[in-house]
């Protein structure tokens, strides 16, 4: 006897993500899932963006890492609320972890929530965290071939911050290749050239994110 | 190794479906669809399932995994094609202007139970 099931796996995660998004919507909080490899500069990008954004929008951050509270400490130094999630053996954040972290925040006091995912270009893409926007971070030293090598990740992004562009003069990196391969995966993904280190492009990205959050 | 978490969920979804159907026989086979763009490795999923299934209702069941290719739609010519190369452009007209429409599936399709 054959039982026809047709059940989505990861449905439990999707359900929790849906609940997280609904509670953020009720509170008027816009959430951004920040994804990228270890060392791409996800935390550094937040350190550059938050002082610009928090002038207009109260910001909070959920930090995901396998271990340590180092990133949370860097964010806390900026004077914004932060919750650290340590995933232990887990290679990604899931909606259940984010739901627990969101419960630690005073949603009435914030408008913009960054969720910095675990540094990983594979499984993080599969888990809806209840976010409204997915921002990828790819850094110049990682190489211009990463879009094609990790299509699952790069096809799920609403925007990509190409970070460490201050290193472009020193490395062989084809920016147009990244832009055109990304367009092939998802034509609507916006690309921002930034340098978290010298601040180039940060104002433009901050302005775009604030406009998305205001919609 | 998120395949272990997915195998756990697979077992629990299968359990729910079996209870709902009222079937009591031994579970012979689970049919899954794991799209090539789903980010899930069928080998790793199989490995995790074989280790987690013993002692559950799906102990001894075999996994039959279909792996559909990425599905691309060409915007200029409208043709939909399955492909292993999402950067290869449209095989019909050569245009690079294609949109991914499928290949991310992660589904339990059916459960076969001994009569």
Image: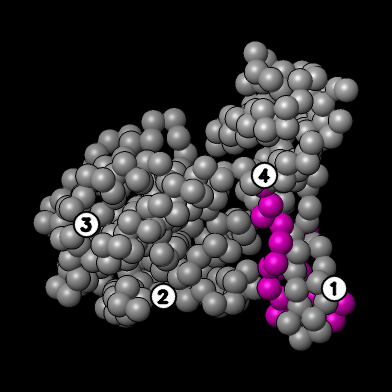
Left or right of A107? Residue A145 is right
Q: How much space separates mark 1 and mark 4, taking CA atoms?
A: 32 Å
Quadrant of residue A132 in the image?
Answer: bottom left
Cα distance, mark 3 to mark 1? Answer: 49 Å
Whichever of labels 4 and 2 marks the residue nearer the N terminus, that label is: 4
Q: Give the CA distance from mark 3 to mark 4.
A: 33 Å
| A84 to B24, vertically: above or below | below
In x, y percent, where is residue A43?
A: 30, 55
Helix, strand or loop: magenta stretch: loop
In the picture, which quadrant includes the N terminus of chain A?
top right
Disc 1 crowd, CA 10 A, few/some/many (<14, 14-19, 20+): some
**Mark closest to the chain's N terminus, 3 or 2:** 3
Is residue B81 at least partly visible in the picture? yes
Question: Mark 4 = which residue?
Answer: A7
What range is drawn magenta here?
B84-106
Q: Residue A107 carries which label?
A: 3
A200 left or right of A186? left
Residue under the point 80% across and 44% down:
B66
Dot 4 and dot 2 residues touching (CB under 8 Å): no
Q: Is residue A197 visible?
A: no
Tell which residue pokes out farthest to the top in this image. B55
* Figure check: B70 above or below A72: below
Disc number lying in front (3 or 2): 3
CA distance separating discs 3 and 2: 29 Å
Left/right placement of residue B22 relative to residue A77 reads right
Subunit that carries the residue with mark 4: A
């Amino acid at each position: 006897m054959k039982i026809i099931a047709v059940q989505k796996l990861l449905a439990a995660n999707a359900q929790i993500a849906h609940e997280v998004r609904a509670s953020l919507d009720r509170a008027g909080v816009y959430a951004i899932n920040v994804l990228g490899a270890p060392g791409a500069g996800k935390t550094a990008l937040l350190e550059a963006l938050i002082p610009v954004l928090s002038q207009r929008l109260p910001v909070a951050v959920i930090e995901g890492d396998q271990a340590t509270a180092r990133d949370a400490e860097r964010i806390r130094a900026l004077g914004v609320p932060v919750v650290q999630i340590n995933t232990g053996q887990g290679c990604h954040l899931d909606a259940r972890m984010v739901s627990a972290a969101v419960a630690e925040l005073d949603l009435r006091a914030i408008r913009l929530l960054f969720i910095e995912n675990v540094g990983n270009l594979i499984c993080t893409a599969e888990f809806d965290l209840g976010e409204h926007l997915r921002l990828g971070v790819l850094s110049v030293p990682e190489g211009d071939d990463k879009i094609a090598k990790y299509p699952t990740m790069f096809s799920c992004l609403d925007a990509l911050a190409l970070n460490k562009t201050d290193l472009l003069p020193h490395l062989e990196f084809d920016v147009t290749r990244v832009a055109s391969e990304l367009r092939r995966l998802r034509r609507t993904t916006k690309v921002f050239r930034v340098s978290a280190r010298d601040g180039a492009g940060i104002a433009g990205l901050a302005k775009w994110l604030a406009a998305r959050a205001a919609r | 190794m998120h395949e272990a978490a997915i195998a756990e969920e697979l077992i629990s979804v299968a359990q729910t479906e079996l209870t709902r159907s009222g079937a009591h026989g031994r579970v012979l086979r689970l049919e899954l669809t794991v799209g090539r763009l789903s980010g899930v490795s069928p080998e790793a999923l199989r490995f995790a399932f074989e280790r987690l299934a013993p002692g559950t209702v799906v102990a001894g069941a075999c996994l039959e995994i279909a792996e559909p290719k990425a599905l691309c739609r060409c915007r200029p010519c409208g043709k939909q094609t399955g492909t292993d190369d999402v950067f290869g452009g449209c095989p019909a007209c050569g245009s690079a202007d294609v949109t991914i429409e499928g290949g991310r599936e992660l589904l339990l399709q059916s459960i076969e139970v001994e009569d």
